[in-house]
Amino acid sequence: MGALSQFLAHLYTIVTVLFTILIIELVILVRSITGNIQESKKKTITTKQYLKLIEEKIPARRYKKTRFIMDDSIECAVCLSLFEEGEFVRKLKCKHIFHKDCLDRWLQQDWATCPLCRTTVLPEEIMMKYRQFLHRQEYEGSDEDL
């Protein structure tokens, strides 16, 4: 009888230790998953932040015919409509001009280049962070920015 009670005491100790180890492993797993999710959220840029960065890098101005006279830039190459006096436009480093909304939509469609000459408009790291946000939104099905 003494051997049986000693065996049960050892079994109880072993089960307690294994259960404790299991709980510790679960806590570590949960913390690593939530840490990765929070870390990936910090690395991404929301649409609102992305548009703000575009405005900082390429500020919009009102169109004036005397300011932007160029032979081939009388119309927006994205929407193909003529520029009208007073409309908001963005002029890129490559000297191409687009309606503000047209270029913003283009840049939100996962393109970080000029629609005409494909010159890089935004740094690649910004685009990567925005792409991560877009892909995470697709995966999670979230409507955060809508």
Image (tube, rainbow, N blue to C red):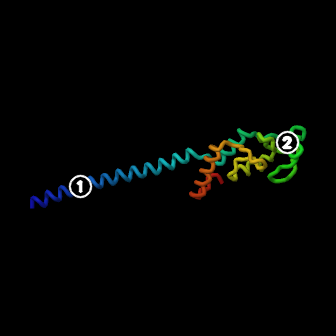
Residue 23 visible? The answer is yes
Q: Where is residue 19 in the image (x, y as percent from the top left)?
A: 30, 55
Is the residue 115 above or below the residue 60 in the image?
Answer: below
Q: Residue 63 carries which label?
A: 2
**Could you tell me which secondary element the residue under label 1 belongs to?**
helix
Residue 52 visible? The answer is no
Q: Position of residue 12 (x, y in %)?
A: 21, 56
Is the residue 119 above or below the residue 139 in the image?
Answer: above
Labels in figure, total: 2
Q: Residue 111 carries which label?
A: none
Instruction: Depth check: give the residue in front, 119 or 145.
Output: 119
Picture residue at 78% right of the left edge, 46% below the top? 100
Q: Residue 14 carries which label?
A: 1
Query: Furthest-left residue in view?
Result: 1
Picture residue at 72% right of the left edge, 41% below the top? 55
| Pointer 1 or 2: first along the chain | 1
